[in-house]
Image (tube, grey):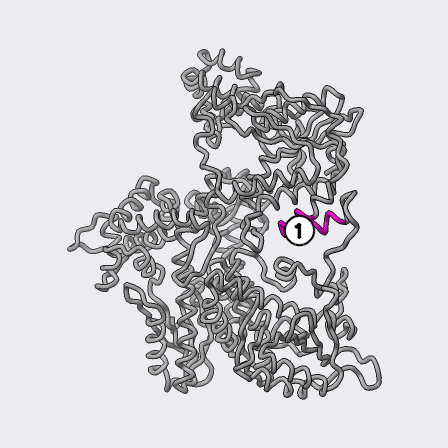
Amino acid sequence: MKNAIQKKLVQGADAPLYIIDVSHFIFRAYYSVGHLSTRDGQPVGAVFGVANMLVSLFNEMQPQHVVIAMDSRTPTFRKTLYPAYKANRPPVPEDLKAQISLVTELVDAFDLAVLQCDGFEADDIIATATKAAVARDMGVVIVSADKDLMQLVDDRVVMLDTLKKKVWDSDAIAEKWGVPPALLGDLLALAGDSSDNIPGVPRIGPKTAAPLLAQHGSLTALLAAAPTLKTKAAERLVDFADDARLSRQLVALKDDVPIAVDIDALRYDGPRAERLLPLLEQLEFHQLKTRLFGDIPGAPNTDTAAPAPPDVTYRALHTLEEVRAVIAKAHEQKCVAIDLETTSVDPMRAEIVGVALSYQALEGVYIPIAQPQQDPQGPNLPLGDVLEALRPLLTDAQVAVVIQNLKYEDIIFQRHGIHIANIHMDPMLASYLLRAGERTHGLDVLAQTLLHRKTRTYDEVTEKQRGHQLLFQEVSLEAATEYAAEDAEITLALSQHMEGALREADMLSLLHDVEIPLARVLTRMEMTGVSVDVPLLQEMSARFAVELEEITARAHDAAGREFNLASPKQLQEILFTELKLPPSKKTQTGWSTDVAVLQELSFLHELPGLLLQHRELSKLKNTYLDALPALVHPETGRIHTSYNQAVTATGRLSSSSPNLQNIPIRSERGREIRRAFVAQGDMRLLSADYSQIELRILAHLSNDPALMAAYTQGVDIHERTARAIYGIPDDAPVSRDQRAAAKTVNFGVIYGKTGFSLAKELGISRAQGQHFIDTYFSLYHGVADYMERTVAQARVDRAAFSLLGRRRELRDIASPNFNIRQAAERMARNMPIQATAADLLKLAMIRVDRALRENGLSARMILTVHDELVFEVPATQIDATREIAVAQMEGAMSLSVPLQVETGEGANWADAH
């Protein structure tokens, strides 16, 4: 970015002045960084965002002159001019207010000059400082993303958005807004700004304003010419001319704020290390502190990111006597963290390379099984002997075992005949409960985030380079010991840290009663796997290939020429240029050709419908028909899908290799693929599926009388809704299409559908879509009240909760951005329902699995998709298994309406469902 700035700025006698709009960054960081707090609960997300921006700016740009611009502490002249100015803005959140003084302290510790003046916004301060710098023959870099400040850009001034790493010069601004920076104030005055409550001229947005200003040269000239114009906007320009002039005054930046801008005093020589470093330590910004030590002049040359504390001990065990001695000590402690090093990420194929243990803080040992031989005796110990030594420890219910990603290692141990009696903690699952919205819960990230420890990564130990990486069994014993023993030691440390955090968050029972027991159930499911009919899949693949060729030929005929159906660029050219179909939304690569667009266009031309058919067939063929045979395990002859327990924000399970969730449920193509999932020998498949589980949970949560009565009395809820939205009398029939539309409405409410989105999905008018929504809430008024209460509570908690206390943070629910805030409100309404449904299914899986084993049945749970459980059952045990499954699933959670489970059986999944 530094080179880009140098190219875009006319260079002055001195290096440019960097003016940082810190007020902008405080709010931007607050809404983008997410929830971040110190161990004692002090919110620091906004402070971290500002600090991170400053460190990145100083490291990359190395500015010589810097100043911070801050907003007035008192009402500004704009408020006097127009009392409604910024009246729409919500109050500053309390947890953000608490951080503003910390930002001021941070700026002071960085030893940065600050410009602030009562009665003026930071934008006016920046305009005044910019004017002073240019008068000194200096260039200016305004560090902000505020569109109002783009008015200041010229050949001596650029804007830098550090988050997007974007440099805004005059050309970039003209390309974005359609006018040069000199006219941007006029354009903003016409367009108005709802966030600042600047009125503008109704129905004149930036795209309308730009050509008008380009034609007339200024807002003043445009308003003067308005009475004679022949455009649709002319009347509005005349009627709202005073609003436009007022808006122009509001968006104008004052460059004569009464402050002294001493450019020489703004020279920057680095932070005040004696104040900054203790502050970063207090705020627990350990990574930033490390970056500063190496990169900012004047800071102490100290390295606090050491891989491990100096008193940590990692060692390899070379004899079985040493192994037994360590195991005896672990047995005394009644707690051990264990970590397996293996040859594969697939637990059904992985072979054990080594075992690491830790039973007390800052100590870890590694037992090599298959490391490189380094002396005549060799460092390795026999796997069988090591496992037998471990067996008494791991099978003792009094010993609390701690494992990161327990399901993986549980499968491997069970493959070797060891059933761990008491898995007490999995940091990955604990992190998932505490921070459900995070993308990863890996050990390295948790160590860095929670323990401030930089661990050795797998890629480092295996010397990963372009095109080359060692297998773990090729890593030296010394490196393997340091890596594996550290993993076990870190796992133990995280366990102790997270147990307290879960207890404080009142989620410890979720871990011990739901997530860990479920992981044990998933272990058994994954190990059992499911059988597939490979010849049937191959036959279907060949048939789909023929159909794809036929669809391709028809698509070529419809387009009038041959083209690549998978090429977005060619589709754009044919659909929108050659066939002149109306485009609806644009992407970075041109007009969109996604599914929603093609569905709309399919009413206008044959080709989009053919493209949709081709995409569906291609996806099914590539994802399932061709991929499933390759996933069959060579020894078991079955597919062992992997269930992901720590991925979705709502607590729902997902699956991979293969992803079973994406097999179409209602389409005939999906049923064909399900037919390939079969029972072996004299077994049968039994499907048990919750009926309308989300709607029943909604009835319970909302306590809506009509919804509860419908489920208590066994009324068809979709038919009831259909009668209401279509005005069908009780003695008249409801058609299949009407019931289907009502079903869409019933479930659409849960997902926050609006009248517009409902109309689009059902192919009806917006007015009718809104009528459906309004009628629904009139019929089920308790649902409307519940939705309102839920969003209001989420604003207070900044989170939403399931019935069992599963939490999802919703920081964006206070966002000033309407679209972002609305999305968070949808999550607030939907999350308690979805997360409770997830918890219910998990409890049901645990209960059914336990009951089947306690009753000595041979039935095995083999699949779960959405709200359905699938079992492989001996034909003679179908009735007993069905009875247990229904009883345990319907009794898994006590709701104010009855739960209902529907079952089916067959030789394959399609017939059973």
The answer to if 289 sits in the magenta stretch is: yes
Q: Is residue 212 above or below residue 98?
A: above
Q: Quadrant of the C terminus?
A: bottom left
Camera-nearest residue between 170 and 133: 133
Q: In the rendered picture of this protein, how many numbered marks are placed on residues? A: 1
Question: Residue 101: x and y, percent?
Answer: 58, 39
Helix, strand or loop status at disc 1: helix
Task: Please report the residue visible at 59 percent of the width from the left and 45 percent of the height from the top.
Answer: 570
The answer to if 738 sits in the magenta stretch is: no
Quick check: 718 left or right of 543? left
Task: Please report the residue visible at 37 percent of the width from the left and 87 percent of the height from the top.
Answer: 876
Magenta region: which residues? Answer: 278-293
Camera-nearest residue between 564 and 518: 518
Task: Please report the residue visible at 47 percent of the width from the left and 55 percent of the height from the top.
Answer: 808
Camera-nearest residue between 889 and 451: 451
The residue where tag 1 is placed is 281
- Given the image, on which type of amino acid does mark 1 rest? Glu
Residue 623 in view of the camera: yes
